Amino acid sequence: MRHFDELIQELLDKLLLMGRLAESMVQTALRILIERNASLADEVNRKESEVNELQIEIDDSAVKLTALQQPVGTDVRFLFMASRIATELERIADQAVNIVENAHHVINAPPLKPFVDLPVMGEIAERMVRDSLEALVARDCTLANRVLEEEKKVDAYRDQIFRVLLTYMMADPGTIQRALALILISRNLERVGDHATNIAEEVIYLVEGREVRHKHESSERTFRS
């Protein structure tokens, strides 16, 4: 049993390492945009490879532990959840790569406003990733629920950024390429927040056995209608 606990901890450690890498990729991608430093792209690409390798290792370990140890209760929930969280983290890393690609359309021209509220939006999205993983370690549903609430802020910034950049494009067609790239980056950050939210929902399921996936989305749609 102690050996099994050690293997579970190793799996958790890999998830946390994967999370730190994915979060740092988002930070670096935004630095490329804000500092106009394309040389940092190699760092993002290198970390993406590490993230992909960790996802494969986590999936493999989760399957083997489930098959060989036949866990029950929260242990079996954690093993199923580990693979899903690894997928969310891999997708966060993908969004960082997308930010880098979109930033290339911006950094060689004068900044817009500059970069509207993207840095603030990025800080919130990064914090959501960090808090969702901290909630996992601490089995803290209060913190996980806070991540769900933060998603609303990210969505609000996305909408605000779109409105501002739309006015730029209407006033000056020369800004269209840069503005569209920044809109895409805001959507990349929104997706980072979405994936962090999914991790927080997994934590709630792990700790309480309560399914909350998609419920907050339904309530948002009801409110808007």
Image (spheres, grey):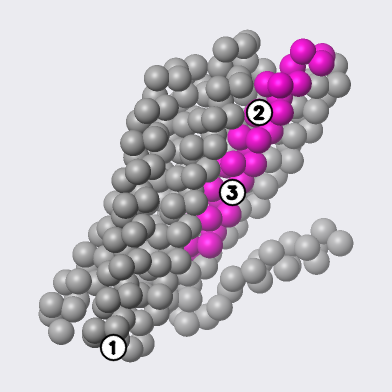
Q: Please state, as top left, top right, bottom left or bottom right, where the C terminus lies in the image.
A: bottom right
Q: Earlier in the sequence, mark 2 or mark 3?
A: 2
Give the distance between the C-alpha atoms of the residues marked 2 and 3, in whole angstroms: 15 Å
Asked if the residue at tag 3 contacts the one at tag 2, i.e. Cβ–Cβ closer than 8 Å, the answer is no
Q: Regarding mark 1 in the picture, which secondary structure is present there?
A: loop
Point out the stretch of residues depicted in magenta: 172-200
- The label on residue 70 is 1
Q: Earlier in the sequence, mark 3 or mark 1?
A: 1
- The label on residue 181 is 2
* 149 horizontally vs 74: left or right: right
Crowd rating for badge 3 (residues with CA inside 10 Å; few <14, some 14–19, many 20+): many
Mark toward the viewer: 3 or 1: 1
At x 58%, y 74%, the residue is 212
- The label on residue 191 is 3
Q: Earlier in the sequence, mark 2 or mark 1?
A: 1
29 or 94, nearer to the observer: 94
Q: Position of residue 184 (x, y in %)?
A: 65, 35
Query: Residue 182: within the magenta?
Result: yes
Asked if the residue at tag 1 contacts the one at tag 2, i.e. Cβ–Cβ closer than 8 Å, the answer is no
